[in-house]
Image (cartoon, coloured by chain):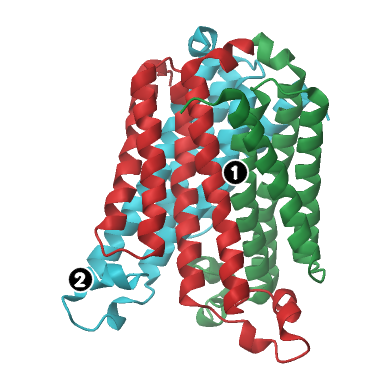
Chain colours: A cyan, B red, C green
Amino acid sequence: MAQLADNEVFRAFATYAALVLVKMMLMSLMTAFFRITRKVFANPEDAAVHSKGGDLKKYLRTDQDVERVRRCHLNDLENIVPFVGVGLLYALSNPDLSTALLHFRVFAASRVLHTISYLVPLPQPSRALTFFVGFLATLSMAFSTVRSLLLL
Amino acid sequence: MAQLADNEVFRAFATYAALVLVKMMLMSLMTAFFRITRKVFANPEDAAVHSKGGDLKKYLRTDQDVERVRRCHLNDLENIVPFVGVGLLYALSNPDLSTALLHFRVFAASRVLHTISYLVPLPQPSRALTFFVGFLATLSMAFSTVRSLLLL
Amino acid sequence: MAQLADNEVFRAFATYAALVLVKMMLMSLMTAFFRITRKVFANPEDAAVHSKGGDLKKYLRTDQDVERVRRCHLNDLENIVPFVGVGLLYALSNPDLSTALLHFRVFAASRVLHTISYLVPLPQPSRALTFFVGFLATLSMAFSTVRSLLLL
């Protein structure tokens, strides 16, 4: 145990993985913020808090801004899950610290820039580029992991 | 290897992580149960099993109860993924066993109560409170992990 | 660290986990491919690239094939996340190599066949069977992990 917590690649992975996971969690708060300020809900029991006895139906609709945040959150899930899974295995396959740090930093930066591109929104291909940079960082770690540890 | 399987914090994490992941998997069965009993499907090939040669279209619709279970499942994904990722790194950062157990138990309880609040459904703020308790447990582990292992 | 990278069960897990995570990542590319070839977008800034100054609205719609790929991707997330989480804990609980390999191979095969069943699509119960085989492989690893490491 002490060995893992002393290993620099593992420590770097733990830091970046915790940061991108917390960043992903913040998307839940952003969805809640937009739902409450726009008064747009998916559940009647949520709308009931804001309708104060009035008509629920006008609060149960979809809103372009809420849907945009939700798509951004789902895109995080689809990309951060592979990063955390692959990145942990990669960190345990004894890579160089500098190479590992490069992968972790590029991925973390790509996800922050992806969220900015999605929510502003910036014109394409901003979002597509930030997506692909993070995607390639994860793929590169997956290839390196399988090459180091392959046992089928 | 033997060291990890002997470590009490790791064993506690493994137990709670397996439990919440199995709980999340059960949401798939619940969605299937509602789809079959309500005869509400997303795919024509699924509706075909139940239409017995009749009109497929009446089985291809959305249903409030099915959508509620699906939102609950997605909320599990959005929250259990960070718990499992952050929790593993936290468990490997040598925390006190009692502090770690407190985090794992609070998170697991919050997700069971969140599902009950969502599916009954209980009036708000039941669901919001259970969400935030689990959210804060994961955030607390993330801060502790980054403080212990920080390497940027 | 060297111990983990030398452990055969861990190496087998790392290989299969990396493969199924990369397979899941490819669903993003398939969604992008269908969106671009069918000219069906969720975001105005994406549609703008293809509308060349024309009417955006006709590109902002839903398409059955795009939605099918997205459901398949979400089903991967719902099932591959528990496999990666539970499988790692299971791999660290000192199982037999041959038993572990059986679980990993059955799960990986079930997900490839699930995707084929979903996207062709094959008539039911093809997709349901491939789903359940993978589901049971993950459940079996979860029970084995909890039995080995239980600490509540």
Label annotation for residue C81: 1
Residue B128 falls left or right of residue A98: left
Decide if residue C65 is in sight here: yes
Residues behind callouts 1 and 2 on a single chain: no
The chain identifier of the residue carrying mark 2 reads A
The local secondary structure at tag 1 comes to: helix
What's the chain of the residue with tag 1? C
Q: Is B115 situated left or right of B133 in this image?
A: right
Q: For the point 27% across and 72% down, which residue is it?
A: A47
Q: Are the residues tagged 1 and 2 within 8 Å (C-beta)?
A: no
User: Is A54 situated left or right of C81 in this image?
Assistant: left
The front one of A4 and B130 is B130
Picture layout, residue A46 above or below residue B89: below
C-alpha distance separating marks 1 and 2: 35 Å
- The crowding category of the residue bearing disc 2, from other C-alpha atoms within 10 Å (few below 14, some 14 to 19, many at least 20), is some
Q: Which residue is mark 2?
A: A50
User: Whole-percent x and y of residue B99?
Assistant: 33, 22
Q: Mark 2: which amino acid?
A: His
Q: Which mark is residue A26?
A: none
Above-or-below relation of A26 to B48 = above
Residue drawn at x 36%, y 45% as measured from the top left: B110
Residue closest to the eye, A58 or A145: A58
Disc 1: CA contacts within 10 A as few (<14), some (14-19) or many (>=20):
many
Q: Position of residue C37 (x, y in %)?
A: 70, 69
**Quadrant position of the C terminus of chain A in the picture:** top right
Seen at 43% across and 14% down, the residue is: B94
Can you say whether B101 is above or below A136 in the image? above
